[in-house]
Amino acid sequence: MVKFAQGALAALILVVVNSVASAQTAMVDRFVPEAALVGEARFKVLLFPVYDASLYAPKGNYRKSGPLALELNYLFDVEKERIVNQTVKTFERRKLGSDADVAKWRKIMGEHFSDVQKGDRILLAFPDLQTVVFSTNGSEPTFVSDAGFAEAFKDLWLGDNVRNKGFQNKLLGLK
């Protein structure tokens, strides 16, 4: 009986995981026509893995002007406030926007971000130069229409002045 229960639980987990993956794939296709994988990379802080990232673009051909989608598969739990604070610090360190811009973007992130649990799949879609779309585990997306935020946010991973060029190169399919 225990083996049956374990088997049933494993099957249920596979169904849930597959439905989340299907919903997320549909979400990528919704915002990136003819979406195909460009590259994948694991983001680490020191030696600690934070998330696995996958970049999608039409036919797998990356163009900074988009459209494109970035999927982040988190490898541990992270509170929303920590994500917002780290993102703000990165904006400030890399001089992405004025103090007023960063303050406005902090508010945007506070409204659109949520706590992340291990295994959550966060979709960040950039269907055009002024829009960022957020979705967690295939949930109904939220939209931010702010060209400055869209550019700065995309530059966190794909800009000219990234801290981890090796990560970026893998994401862009270059290594």
Image (cartoon, helix red, strand yellow):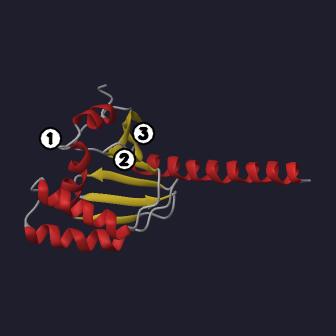
127 with respect to 18 (left or right): left
146 with respect to 20 (left or right): left
Between 76 and 38, the one lying in front of the other is 76
How crowded pointer 1 is (Cα within 10 Å; few <14, some 14-19, many 20+) is rated as few
| Residue holding disc 3 | 35
Q: Report helix, strand or loop for mark 2.
A: strand
Amino acid at the residue labelled 2: Ala
| Residue holding disc 1 | 160
Q: Is residue 11 above or below residue 139?
A: above
Q: Report helix, strand or loop for mark 3.
A: strand
Disc with the residue nearer the chain's start (1 vs 3): 3
Amino acid at the residue labelled 3: Ala
In this view, the mark in front (1 or 3): 1
Is the C terminus in the top left, top right, bottom left or bottom right quadrant? top left
Residue 19 point in image, percent of width and height: 63, 52
Q: Do the residues under discs 1 and 2 have CB atoms within 8 angstroms? A: no
The image's mark for residue 69 is 2
Q: Residue at the spot x=27%, y=44% of the render?
A: 66
Q: Do the residues under discs 3 and 2 have CB atoms within 8 angstroms? A: yes
Q: Residue at the spot x=69%, y=48% of the render?
A: 14
Farthest right residue? 1
